[in-house]
Image (spheres, helix red, strand yellow):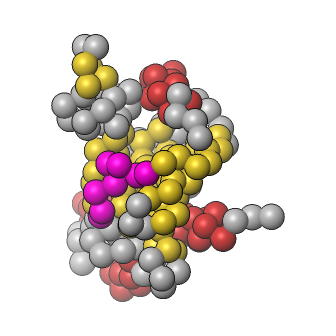
Amino acid sequence: MVKPVTQFMTRYLVQEYDTEVMKYAARHHGDFTDELSALSELCGPGVAPPLERPVIPDRAWREENEPKADLVAARTAFRYENHAHPRLGELHAFYLSDIDPDLPERRLRQLIYVADEGKGFLVIARYALCERCRGTGQTGGSTCPECAGSGWRREAGEDLSAPGRLVEATNFEVPPHPDDLPAWEALQRRVP
């Protein structure tokens, strides 16, 4: 049986993909803003991805960016975690690839937190892989000062640097890029 949070996340990822494609492909700005609005409804305050485009794209922008619509790849989910957060209760974490067409390789890049705060599931925080420690939490044998040892840095939403006790972890697939393996191995050391 598919968990309701997994159904929500699938809906979010489909909407995010549609919004990213329209960012490049929409001839009318309203088509893009409709998709962006639908994506924002799935996010808590200040969490929706900062997708932007000109209101009236000029010819140069269209020539450079419209081909990117065909390069947008749906995110790959690499891992799911369920945490017992002291304030939020169940806190769900999804480790994902990037969606940016300028970064076409499926790389471990994003951590999205989802919680039900009484009105249904919402994305409440977005984190990016820490570039300094490459997701390991360590630099030069010490705790990474950039991410405080978590391997991830907050981009938007709630500060969930302490997500709570890990209750469940499920790996879906190993990131295919060899540079992601240290971060992946760091995640594997986290067990319920």
149, above or below 31, in the image: above
179, above or below 146, in the image: above
- Quarter assignment of residue 46: bottom left
Q: Is residue 34 visible?
A: yes
Residue 159 magenta-highlighted: yes
Q: Which residue is rendered at x = 48% and y = 82% of the image?
A: 118
Residue 129, percent across and down? Answer: 36, 39
Task: State the residue lying farthest toward the left.
Answer: 145
Task: State the residue lying farthest toward the front.
Answer: 86
Residue 93, percent across and down? Answer: 50, 53
Q: Quick check: 176 left or right of 113?
A: right
- Closer to us: 89 or 1: 89
- Closer to us: 173 or 140: 140
Q: Which residue is rendered at x = 52% and y = 63% of the image?
A: 90
| Label total for image | 0
Q: Which residue is rendered at x = 80% and y = 64% of the image?
A: 1
- Closer to us: 76 or 45: 45
Residues shaded magenta: 157-164
Q: Is residue 18 visible?
A: no
Residue 66 magenta-highlighted: no
Task: State the residue lying farthest toward the top.
Answer: 140
71, above or below 148, in the image: below
The C terminus: image quadrant: top right
Q: Quick check: 23 left or right of 75?
A: left
